[in-house]
Structure formats: structure tokens, C-alpha cells
Amino acid sequence: MLIIQNQEIAHHQNEGIRSKWTFEELRKIPEFGALIAFLALFIFFAICAPRFFSLRNITSLLTIIAELGIMTVGISFLMIGGEIDLSVSSAYATAGFVFVTLANIFTFPLGSLLAFIVALLVSLLIGFVNSRVVLRGGIPSFIATLGMMMFLRGILLGITGGRSISYAGDSLVPSLLTGIMAYRFRPSHFWFIAIVVVFSFILNHTVFGNRVFATGGKKLAAYTMGVNVNQVKTACFMISSVLAGLSGVIAISRFSLANVSFGQGMELEAIAASVIGGTLMTGGYGSIIGAALGAGIMGMVRTGLVMAGVPSYWYNAFVGIILVIAAVVNLKLRSTILGE
Amino acid sequence: MRFGKKLLLALTVVLLSTLLLGVGLAQEEEVNVWVVVHGGIADPFWKRVEKGVMDAATNHSDLEVTYTGPSEYNFTEFIADIEAAVASKPDVLVCTLTEPDAMDEVLRTAIADGLPVIAINAPDLREPPENRIPVLTYVGEDSYHIGVVAAEETLKRFTPKRALFVNHHPGARNIELRGQGFIDTLGKNDIPAEALDITADAVQGAEITLAYLVAHPDTEVIFSTNTLRTEAIVTRLLDEGIDVGNEVKIASMDMSEKVLEYIQEGQVMFTLDQQQYLQGYLGVEFAYLHAKYGFTPPPAPVSTGPGVITAENVPQLMELSKQGYR
């Protein structure tokens, strides 16, 4: 039943694309609201904040958006699959620490590459453990990943005593991930775009993506339709963690420094970005492009407010309003589309 | 009705153009200074810096100052704010150098592109000095010296059996140096002293401190270098039934109304004042004078303290603290 409903959504979307672009049809695209909000905010800040619309600022915005966005893509995948992951911020910091520590030890050629691979494997493992605890242990993912978040952050604090570790490894991975290019663009901007394209394709045009939607929509229905729900969820948990880890390695390469406080609170920003981008907390509905736009909105609001001279106390208030509006709009959209 | 609409449109156009022209003209002559601190700017400590910044801003009609930083300490947000400041192309950037390693990239390129930078509050103390970010000057505390003064002031009053330095910002070089100065000076007098990381969370920090006291009951003095932490620790220890001020004495740094109250009531022996109002004030003043007239500011460190505040000078400071200066 649910798969049929999902197909209906896709059908609606396709119709919207093929036929004339009426507002009714446009607004059925999950990322439509986020796109409008993104453009509106961009224009608003470009007018209100001098130099907001400058190449120097656009590139530094992209840097922030790419790091949050990569994490958001991962968590959106999982949220569409019907689960949540609060440990992404800790996976971010853990991967960064593993990367810096190992790259400092591996002084042989391509040492940083090996450190990078190990860091991503550790992130995958975090996702796998999360999935086991949730699926085998029958614990809600909110609790299981909250535990993982605190556990990892605690371990890092315990090991480092809160001290920062400077990066002293080779420059291969840092320059591949975040080294400054012409006009202050960074590879992370392009990695982010590539990840959005690839994961958007996987979600919308592959059997696996279809199963993610089905699993998140109605688990039992998906199960009876022959979808291995646990397998799909495990993959989603691992995608969420590995992208968070990648984001962490990128950020820490940029700073050439790992500190245990890095990424704290970022899990909520990523969830907020995902919801703003049209993903439903209840699963079964969402978009990767929307998630990217959501991350764009989060990054833009912060920098935009600062550049407009608004004290940063207002940042959370601003994001809070956008988040609630987005959630209400998404819920309305869902009931319109599914006729619920 | 139609005429009304046209009139409204015309008025809007005129108003907007005047506004834009005004902004354009104003921007032509203005000295634009950005102040970015690692904060959090909601912390009472940073409100003093902000007041100094704003007071300096009102000194000159052609000075436009933007003051910002994360509302609670968050390094990634702080760097995003620095990036936003650099992208805004101010005449001078005044900022804290809380993690110089991680600030190298953004600040060095900005400085190479011609942006003058003045450091306040947290300096770049890396060795050798050639490796430090080439800022015009640094206005703020001389960190190691603060620890030395705290130990000397303690020894003037009594000789503790054991001493503890609580580090509320592990990894920040200047805070670690305060502890080092304290521990080294007491060590020379054969007093065991150590540093304890109490994390970025004030409530959790108080619990950690209490746990340390339970494990080391011979601890007789605690040196805390953040007012919020001092407040949290004193409250927590009192709550636990510990006679703060007798069983355990507190040496603090910086001021808040509550800390001054504790000094008067005898729970806190003294507090060292780094006079952070001056960091904001002088930072902006030096920035303005540099941008406007090309003055080179005095060389680093332009030390803003410490002053030692005891029960005697609390009454007059209470009033100044309420006004946001001290």
C-alpha cells in the first residue's frame, strides 16, 4: 500500500515536471519549500548585509554549508528510512580525531590517505553498532544514538583531557578535501555537490532508494512486500555515520587541529536542516536536494545575521522559527499528497 | 486612488534613494572595525569587553564597529564569524586568538591581503615568536604572570597543604599558562598543586571539582580563572556543606557582582582583574587610530592587568560592576 503511495508521489512529481508548472504541482516537490526559503533568505541578506553577495563570502559560506550539508545528507537518508541518529556530531569529532592521530603517526608516503580510510571505517563501525543496538536491542534510535553520542564524546574527552591535537601529517588528504583553490574555493564544495548528486540519485532512482522510502513509511507493509527492513536500516545508519565522519575529517583538515568540542550541537543543526529541507521526522518522505538546501539555509542564516550586524543571540531564535514553519509546511504537504 | 498609489510609489523611490545615497556617502568616510570574540558573548565577562568596544565606538562619529561572536563558546561558529568579518572587508579586524593553530589559515591570508589585525584577550603564544600570526599588537592579560600573582597572593595569606587549578577551557594556551604560573610558583614552595580539566560546562565543572575535593581532602585552595566557574563551584561546595573560605579558600580571576559578593562574605579570598573593558576599548581605539592616521599601536603584550581585588576595594567596584565597566 505504502509503496503504491510512494509511487503516487513520484507520479505527482513527474506530472509536475512534464506538464505545465502550476503552483499546485510545484509545491508537491519536497524541496520546493526549502528552495523558496533559500532564495528568499539569500536575497534578503544580499540586500541587508553589505558584502554578503561577494565571492569571498560565498566561498566561505560554501565551506560551512558543505561540512554541515554532508552530515545532513547522511542523516536525511536515515530519517527517510524512519530512524534518527543523534551520534552524528560525535562520529564527526571521533573520525576527525582518529584521522589526525593516525596521520601524525603514519609518517610513510600516503600516510594521511590510510588514516583517512581508517577514520571512515571507524565511522562505518559506529553506524553499524548503532544499527545493532537499535534493531537487535529493540531500543528506540533516539535513545541508542543519544547513548552513542555521549559515549564517544566522553571517550574523546577522557583520552585527550580536552586538549587539542595539531595536525602534523602529510598534506595529501587535507589538500584533497579542503585545500584552498582559486578564488578561495575548496574541494569540499565540490565533494558536497557530488555527494548530493550521488545520494539523490540513489534515493530516487534505485531499488535501494525505493526500499528506504518504503521502510521509513510503513515498516510492516514494506516487510510484507519482501523488503529486508533491517538490512535497509543498517545501511542507512552506516551512511549517516560515514558521511558525518567525512564531514568531521574535512572540518578538522581545515583547522589542522582536532578538539573535543568540535561539532558539539551539530546533530541538532543537521536534523533541523534536514527537516527544513522537507524530510519528515516520521520517515518515508524527504529529499536529498532539500537537505542540501536546508543546510544552505542554516549556514546562510548564521553568516547573514552576523554580517547584517545582528547579535548572534538571535541566530537560534531565527532558526527556530524557520524550523517550525518548515515542519508545519511539510506536514501540510504530506496530508495534501497522501490524502491523509 | 490611482494617484495615491503613484504618490506612494514615488515617495518610496525617493526615500530609498536618499537612504542608499546616505549609506553610500556615510560608507565613503567611515572607519569600519569588526570585533570578533570567541565568547560566548552572553557571558557576563564578555559584556565588559562589549561595553569597552561600544564606548570606544561612540568616541568617534566616523567609526562604525560591528561586535560579534558565538552566543556560547563554539569554535566552529567562531571561525565562521571570523570568515564573515574578513569577507566584510573591514579597515581593521580586532579578534581573540583562542586556537592560533586553527586560525592560521584564515588570518594569515587575510593579513597577507592587507587586513590589519589586532589581537585582544587571548594571544598567540606559540614558540618561536616568528611562528605567531603577525598581528599589529595584542591587548590583554600576560597569562603566566597571572598565575604567578595568584600563587603569591595566596602565599601572602597562608600556606596551603595542596592547591588546585581548575581549567575551564582545556586546550586554550593562555588558560593553561595561568595554571602553569600558579603551579610553578607554589611548587617552588614545595606545595603540591595540579591542574584539573573541568570541561566547558559550568555545572558539570562544579561536580568535577567537588569530586576532586572528595578524593583529595587536603586541598586548601582552588584557583578558578572564570567568574561563572567560581560562582558555580562556590555554590556547589556550600551546598555540599563545605565551609568555603575556611576549609577551602578560593582564588578567582575576573569580576562579577556575585564574585564580589563572595569576596565580601569571605568565601573568595581575592580576584585578579584582567580589566577586560580595556581590552575591548583599547583594541578598538588602536584599530581606529591605525586606520585613520596610520599610528602603530604599542608592541605586544599591552598588559591590562592584573589588579588584585580584595574585600577592601569591593564597595566602589560593586557600583562600577553594575554599570558594566569592571
Image: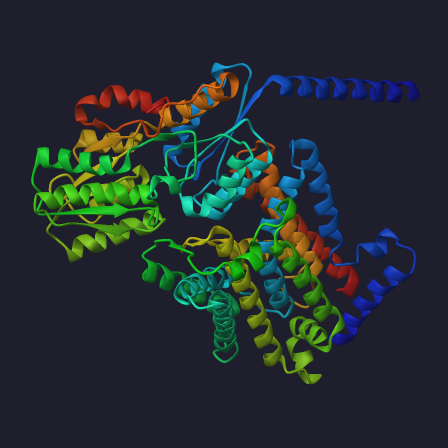
Side (left or right) of B321 relative to B84: left
Side (left or right) of B271 relative to A93: left
Residue A71 in percent (x, y) is at 58, 60
Residue B126 in percent (x, y) is at 34, 43
Side (left or right) of A323 relative to A33: left
Is residue B257 depicted above or below B230 in this figure? above
For the point 66% across and 75% down, which residue is it? A215
Q: Quadrant of residue A289?
A: bottom right
For the point 65% across and 44% down, which residue is it? A183
For the point 8% across and 43% down, which residue is it? B189
Q: Is residue A176 visible?
A: yes
Q: Is residue A339 visible?
A: no
For the point 47% across and 18% down, which residue is it? B289
Judge by depth and name the residue closer to the eye, B78 or B120: B120
Q: Quadrant of the N terminus of chain B?
A: top right
Judge by depth and name the residue closer to the eye, B175 or B114: B114
Judge by depth and name the residue closer to the eye, B319 or A267: A267
Is residue B49 depicted above or below A9 in this figure? above
The colour scheme applied to this rendered structure is: rainbow
Q: Quadrant of the C terminus of chain B?
A: top left
Residue B166 in percent (x, y) is at 25, 47
Residue B274 in percent (x, y) is at 29, 30
Q: Quadrant of residue A157?
A: bottom left
Q: Quadrant of residue A246?
A: bottom right
Question: Total of numbered circles in the picture?
Answer: 0
